[in-house]
C-alpha cells in the first residue's frame, strides 16, 4: 500500500507543479515582458489604483497572475544587470502570497497578509528573467505592482553599499488625503468668547446657590 501511495505521489507531482509554475523564458519570445525602467527623478508620486492601466507610480509596472493558467504567468526580462545589484519589489491586490522565481530557480515569496515583497541581490547574469506566480491555492486572479531597479556599476559603488541606501516606498504609501479634503478641527474659544462666557457662568452659579438656600429655609 505504501509503494502504491508513493507511486501515485510521484506521478502527480509533475502535474501539481505544472499548475503552479510555467516556463520562463517561454518558448514563444512574444510572451516575455520587456521591463522598461523609469529614471528615479521622473517617478510619478501620485496615487494610482491597480486598475489604472498605463500608470507607473514610483516607477512600478502592473501585471496579473491568472488563476490556474501557468502558461500565462508573467515572465519579465531585464538586461544590463551584469556586475550589478538588482532591487525587486512588488505588492499584490488583494493581499496574497505571490512568488518570484529567477532563471536560477531561486524562489522567494511575499507574506500573504501584506502581499508586499522586497529583495536586493547580486545579479548572476547580464540578462535576467523573473517569473511571478502564486503557489498556495489562491482561487482568484491576483493583480500586482512590481518594480525592478538596477544598481550602480562597481566603479560607482566600490563598497557595494547600494542596497543599504534604498527607499522601500511602494505605491500603497502614496495613498493620502487629497489637499482639499475637509478636516474639522476642534473649536477653541477665542479670548473674547471666554471672557463673555465666564461672567454668565458665574451668574448662573450664584442664582442656583440662592435658590438652594431659599429651599433650605423653607
Image (tube, rainbow, N blue to C red):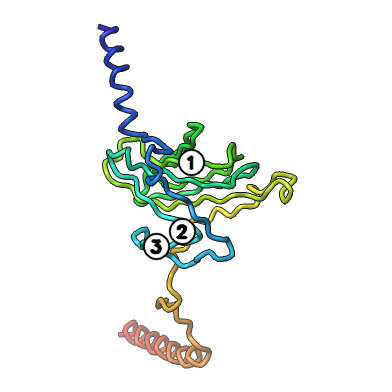
Question: Which residue bears the numbered disc 2?
Answer: 171
> Considering only vertical position in the picture, is 216 above or below 84?
below
Which residue is found at the position 42% from the left and 76% from the top?
Answer: 183
Q: CA distance from mark 2 to mark 3?
A: 14 Å
The answer to which of 124 and 91 lies nearer the viewer is: 124
Classify the position of the C terminus by image quarter. Answer: bottom left
- Check disc 3 and report the residue beneath it: 54
Q: Position of residue 72 (x, y in %)?
A: 33, 42
Q: Residue 77 in the image: state x and y as whole percent.
A: 48, 45
Alpha-carbon distance for marks 1 and 2? 23 Å
Residues under numbered marks 3 and 1 in contact, where contact means CB atoms less than 8 Å apart: no
Q: Residues within 10 Å of mark 1 (few under 14, many from 20)?
A: many
Q: CA distance from mark 3 to mark 1?
A: 22 Å
Q: Which residue in the structure is indicated by mark 1? A: 129
Q: Is residue 1 left or right of residue 75?
A: left
Q: Nearer the viewer, residue 128 or 69?
A: 128
N-term-proximal mark, 2 vs 3 = 3
Which label sits in the foreground, 2 or 3?
3
From the viewer's perspective, tell me whether residue 127 is left or right of residue 4. Answer: right
Quadrant housing the N terminus: top left
Residue displayed at 46% across by 58% down: 171
Q: Which residue is depicted at the point 33% across and 47% down? A: 142
- Dot 2: what SS? helix
Name the residue nearer the viewer: 199 or 131.
131
Q: Residue 141's spot in the image, x, y percent?
A: 29, 46
In which image quadrant can residue 121 be found? top right
Amino acid at each position: 500500500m505504501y509503494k502504491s501511495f508513493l507511486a501515485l505521489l510521484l506521478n502527480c507531482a509533475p502535474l501539481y507543479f505544472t499548475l503552479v509554475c510555467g516556463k520562463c523564458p517561454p518558448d514563444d519570445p512574444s510572451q516575455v515582458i520587456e521591463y522598461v525602467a523609469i529614471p528615479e527623478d521622473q517617478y510619478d508620486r501620485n496615487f494610482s489604483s491597480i486598475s489604472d492601466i498605463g500608470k507607473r507610480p514610483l516607477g512600478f509596472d502592473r501585471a496579473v497572475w491568472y488563476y490556474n493558467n501557468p502558461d500565462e504567468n508573467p515572465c519579465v526580462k531585464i538586461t544590463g544587470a551584469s556586475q550589478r545589484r538588482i532591487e525587486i519589489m512588488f505588492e499584490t491586490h488583494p493581499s496574497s502570497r505571490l512568488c518570484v522565481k529567477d532563471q536560477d530557480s531561486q524562489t522567494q515569496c511575499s507574506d500573504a497578509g501584506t502581499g508586499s515583497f522586497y529583495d536586493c541581490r547580486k545579479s548572476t547574469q547580464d540578462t535576467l528573467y523573473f517569473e511571478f506566480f502564486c503557489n498556495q491555492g489562491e482561487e482568484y486572479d491576483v493583480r500586482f505592482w512590481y518594480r525592478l531597479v538596477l544598481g550602480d556599476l562597481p566603479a560607482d559603488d566600490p563598497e557595494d553599499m547600494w542596497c543599504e541606501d534604498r527607499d522601500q516606498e511602494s505605491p500603497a504609501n502614496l495613498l493620502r488625503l487629497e489637499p482639499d479634503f475637509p478636516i474639522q478641527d476642534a473649536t477653541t474659544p477665542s479670548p473674547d468668547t471666554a471672557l463673555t462666557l465666564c461672567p454668565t457662568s458665574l451668574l448662573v452659579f450664584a442664582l442656583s446657590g440662592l435658590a438652594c438656600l431659599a429651599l433650605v429655609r423653607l
